[in-house]
Amino acid sequence: MESQCTSINKKMDKGIKIDYKVVKTASDLEQAANLFSNEKIIGVDVEADSLHHFKEKVCLIQISSNKQSVVIDPLPLQDISPLKPVFANSAIKKVFHGADYDIRSLYRDFGIEINNLFDTQLACMFLGIRETSLDAVLQANFDVSLDKKYQKKDWSVRPLSLEMMDYAALDSVYLPALSCKVEKKLAETGRLAWVCEECEYLSKVRFDQNNGEPLYLKFKGAGRLNPESLIVLEAILKLRKNIAQKKDKPLFKIFSNQSIMKIALEKPCNLSQLKVNRLLSKKQIQMYGKTIINAVASALEIPAADRPGYPKKKAPFQDSAVPGNIKSLKEWRDSVADKLGIAPGVLISNAVIHAIIIENPATMNDLEKIECLKNWRRKEFGEEILSVLHV
C-alpha cells in the first residue's frame, strides 16, 4: 500500500514493535482486502463511539495477520464492501476477543457477515480462566500490558492521535497467536468442539430492531409494574429517546435507567417531588424537570382502559416435581462445572436449565428439540441430564 495508506512503526512497551498501516482510501482498502484474502487466520477488533453518540457507529476496524496489520478508517470511505468476501470466506479464520458487540456492529453498519469465527475470550472462559479481558489474557500469555486509557475515548473524532491509533492497532495484533495458544489447550481438554459450536452460534448474533414496539419491553424491571406505572415509564423512555436523539448523546447520559424507574414508581406531579425524592440531579431538574412533569401528567390522563399491561407469557404446566428438578439439575451442573474447572453458567446457563425443565425431555430425541442446549451439550451430557431428571 502506498500514498494515503500511512505506514507507522511504533516502539511499544517492553520493546514490542508494532508495524501497521492506516487505510483511508478505496484503493488502499482494495489492496488490504486482497492481501488478507490469502491469509489463513486474521485477528479483528473494532472501535465504536457508543459512549458518546445517540446513533453509535463503527469508527475503526483493525485487522492483523502474521504478516501485516492495518487500521481501517471507515468514516471517509463510502464503501467497505471489499472486506465482505474476506469475512465471508470460511477458509479464513477470523479471531475476535469478546466478539458479540463487534459482530452485531459490523453487520448493522456494513452488512458484514462472518464465517469461521473464533472468539478467544469465549475460549478462555471454557478453559476456566477467570480474568478474561484482553489485557489480562495478553499479560498472561505474552507479558504484554495494554494501556486502556483510550478505551472510553470518542473514536469518531478526527484526526485521531498517533497514540490512539497505536492503542487500536495493538488490540488485533496478538489475536492470531493467542488463538493458536488457546486452541491447543482446548484440544488437550477435549473442549475445542464445544467452543467452535458456540462461535458458530455467536457469528449469527444481530442487534434487535424495535419495530415500533413499546420501549418498556426492553427495559429491565418493567414486567413488575402495574399499568399506571407502565404508561408513565413508556412516556419517560420516549422523552429520553427524543432528547438523546436531538442532542446526539447516548441514552444513559440523559437519564439513568435507575432514575427512570424511580420516576415511573413515584409519578411526580411537581418539581418539588423531583427534588425531595431525589429522582434526578439538580442539573437534570433544571434542564428537564418541567418537561418530565408534563410527560408524567399526560401519561396519567390516559384512561385506565387504554393503558397497556405488560404482556405475560403463559406459563407452561408445571407439576410438583419441577422445583426439585431445577434444584437437581443445578446441583448436577455445579458439580460437573467444578470438576471441569469452569464457571457453572459457561457449562449450562440457568436459562438453558429452565428450557430443559419446560420441555421435560424423556429421550435423547426430546433433547434435540431444545435448541439452546446445543449439540455439544447433548452429546457430552445428554444422558446425564436425562438421568438427573428421571431418577
Image (cartoon, rainbow, N blue to C red):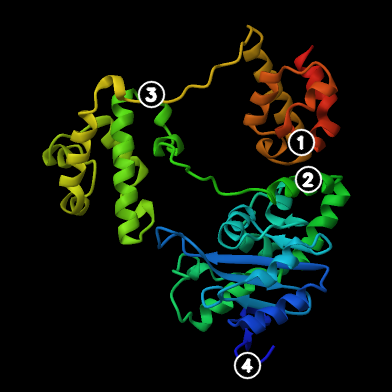
Q: Indicate which disc, 4 or 2, sits on the residue closer to the N terminus.
A: 4
Between marks 3 and 2 in the image, the one whose residue lies nearer the viewer:
3
Nearer to us in this view, 144 or 120: 120
> Which residue is the site of mark 4?
3
* Residue 388 visible here: yes
Asked if marks 4 and 2 touch (Cβ < 8 Å), the reply is: no
Kindly identify the residue that appears in the image at 68 percent across and 35 percent down. 344
Name the side, left or right, on which 154 lies relative to 238: right
The amino acid on which the numbered mark 4 sits, given as a three-letter code, is Ser
The amino acid on which the numbered mark 3 sits, given as a three-letter code, is Gly
The amino acid on which the numbered mark 1 sits, given as a three-letter code, is Lys
Kindly identify the residue that appears in the image at 66 percent across and 36 percent down. 345
> Which residue is the site of mark 2?
197
Kindly identify the residue that appears in the image at 33 percent across and 24 percent down. 227
Asked if marks 3 and 2 touch (Cβ < 8 Å), the reply is: no
- Position of 234 relative to 9 (above/below): above
Asked if marks 2 and 1 touch (Cβ < 8 Å), the reply is: yes
* Residue 127 visible here: no
Q: Secondary structure at mark 4?
A: loop
In the rendered image, residue 83, in percent from the top left (x then y), is placed at 69, 70
In the rendered image, residue 258, in percent from the top left (x then y), is placed at 34, 41
Asked if marks 1 and 4 touch (Cβ < 8 Å), the reply is: no
> Which residue is the site of mark 1?
374
Marks 4 and 3, how far apart in space?
61 Å
Characterize the local packing of mark 3: few (<14), some (14-19) or many (20 or more) Cα atoms within 10 angstroms: some
Characterize the local packing of mark 2: few (<14), some (14-19) or many (20 or more) Cα atoms within 10 angstroms: some
